[in-house]
Image (spheres, rainbow, N blue to C red):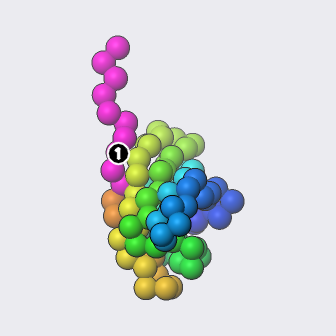
Amino acid sequence: MAFVAADFSLVNYSGNGFHIWHYKSDDLATAIDAAGYFNSVANEVNVGDVIFAHTDADGTPVFGIFVVNANDGSTVDVANITNLAGTDSD
Protein backbone atom coordinates (compact mmCIF):
# COMPACT_ATOMS: atom_id res chain seq x y z
CA MET A 1 0.00 0.00 0.00
CA ALA A 2 1.06 3.62 0.27
CA PHE A 3 1.19 6.46 2.75
CA VAL A 4 -2.25 7.88 3.62
CA ALA A 5 -2.02 11.51 4.70
CA ALA A 6 -5.43 11.40 6.42
CA ASP A 7 -4.02 8.82 8.87
CA PHE A 8 -0.98 10.95 9.79
CA SER A 9 -1.53 13.51 12.52
CA LEU A 10 0.55 15.92 14.54
CA VAL A 11 0.44 15.15 18.26
CA ASN A 12 2.82 17.86 19.49
CA TYR A 13 5.15 20.53 18.18
CA SER A 14 7.80 21.73 20.62
CA GLY A 15 8.54 25.01 18.88
CA ASN A 16 12.16 24.14 18.13
CA GLY A 17 11.52 22.04 15.06
CA PHE A 18 10.78 18.78 16.91
CA HIS A 19 7.47 17.02 16.23
CA ILE A 20 5.64 14.05 17.64
CA TRP A 21 3.33 12.37 15.15
CA HIS A 22 0.84 9.50 15.11
CA TYR A 23 0.25 7.23 12.13
CA LYS A 24 -2.16 4.32 11.75
CA SER A 25 -1.86 2.04 8.74
CA ASP A 26 -2.77 -1.36 7.40
CA ASP A 27 0.79 -1.53 6.03
CA LEU A 28 3.42 -3.65 7.72
CA ALA A 29 6.11 -1.86 9.70
CA THR A 30 8.70 -3.16 7.24
CA ALA A 31 6.92 -1.37 4.39
CA ILE A 32 6.57 1.86 6.36
CA ASP A 33 10.25 2.01 7.29
CA ALA A 34 11.32 1.85 3.64
CA ALA A 35 13.03 5.00 2.38
CA GLY A 36 10.52 7.13 0.53
CA TYR A 37 7.35 6.03 2.33
CA PHE A 38 6.85 9.48 3.91
CA ASN A 39 8.07 11.53 0.93
CA SER A 40 4.77 13.36 0.51
CA VAL A 41 5.26 14.99 3.93
CA ALA A 42 8.97 15.75 3.49
CA ASN A 43 8.25 19.45 4.04
CA GLU A 44 6.59 18.71 7.42
CA VAL A 45 8.84 16.14 9.11
CA ASN A 46 12.33 16.77 10.46
CA VAL A 47 15.23 14.50 11.26
CA GLY A 48 14.72 13.41 14.87
CA ASP A 49 10.93 13.58 14.78
CA VAL A 50 9.19 10.58 16.32
CA ILE A 51 6.17 8.83 14.88
CA PHE A 52 4.04 6.73 17.19
CA ALA A 53 2.65 4.05 14.93
CA HIS A 54 -0.11 1.47 14.79
CA THR A 55 0.91 -0.76 11.90
CA ASP A 56 -0.78 -3.75 10.26
CA ALA A 57 -4.07 -2.48 11.71
CA ASP A 58 -6.10 -4.94 9.64
CA GLY A 59 -3.95 -7.95 10.55
CA THR A 60 -1.71 -8.54 13.55
CA PRO A 61 -1.18 -5.02 14.85
CA VAL A 62 2.24 -3.77 15.90
CA PHE A 63 2.54 -0.67 18.07
CA GLY A 64 5.80 1.23 18.18
CA ILE A 65 7.87 4.26 17.35
CA PHE A 66 9.66 5.25 14.17
CA VAL A 67 12.33 7.98 14.21
CA VAL A 68 12.95 10.10 11.14
CA ASN A 69 16.64 9.50 10.48
CA ALA A 70 16.99 11.22 7.09
CA ASN A 71 15.22 13.93 5.13
CA ASP A 72 16.95 15.71 2.26
CA GLY A 73 13.85 17.74 1.42
CA SER A 74 12.42 15.19 -0.97
CA THR A 75 13.30 11.71 0.33
CA VAL A 76 12.36 10.77 3.90
CA ASP A 77 13.64 7.70 5.69
CA VAL A 78 12.72 6.37 9.12
CA ALA A 79 14.59 3.90 11.28
CA ASN A 80 13.12 0.45 11.91
CA ILE A 81 10.22 0.44 14.34
CA THR A 82 10.94 0.18 18.06
CA ASN A 83 8.24 -2.19 19.23
CA LEU A 84 6.27 -1.07 22.29
CA ALA A 85 4.25 -4.24 22.75
CA GLY A 86 6.22 -5.62 25.68
CA THR A 87 5.10 -8.77 27.46
CA ASP A 88 1.73 -9.34 29.08
CA SER A 89 2.04 -12.33 31.37
CA ASP A 90 -1.53 -12.47 32.66
x and y percentages locating residue 6 in the rendered image = 69, 59
Name the foreground residue: 24 vs 72. Answer: 72
83 to the left or right of 51: left
Note whether residue 78 is visible: no
Name the foreground residue: 61 vs 89. Answer: 89
x and y percentages locating residue 45 in the rendered image = 51, 71
Quadrant of residue 63 within the rendered picture: top left
Main secondary structure along the magenta-highlighted residues: loop
Q: From what the image shows, is residue 9 above or below residue 43?
A: above
Residue plotted at (56% across, 56% down): 12
Residue plotted at (43% across, 79% down): 71
Image quarter where the N terminus lies is: bottom right
x and y percentages locating residue 52 in the rendered image = 47, 51
Task: Provide the residue span drawn in magenta.
Answer: 81-90
Residue plotted at (38% across, 62% down): 67
44 to the left or right of 63: right
For label 1, count other residues whose C-alpha is less than 10 Å away and answer few (under 14), some (14-19) or many (20+): few
Q: From what the image shows, is residue 70 above or below residue 81?
A: below
Residue for badge 1:
83
Q: Amino acid at mark 1?
A: Asn
Note whether residue 72 is visible: yes
User: Does the magenta run of residues contain 63?
Assistant: no
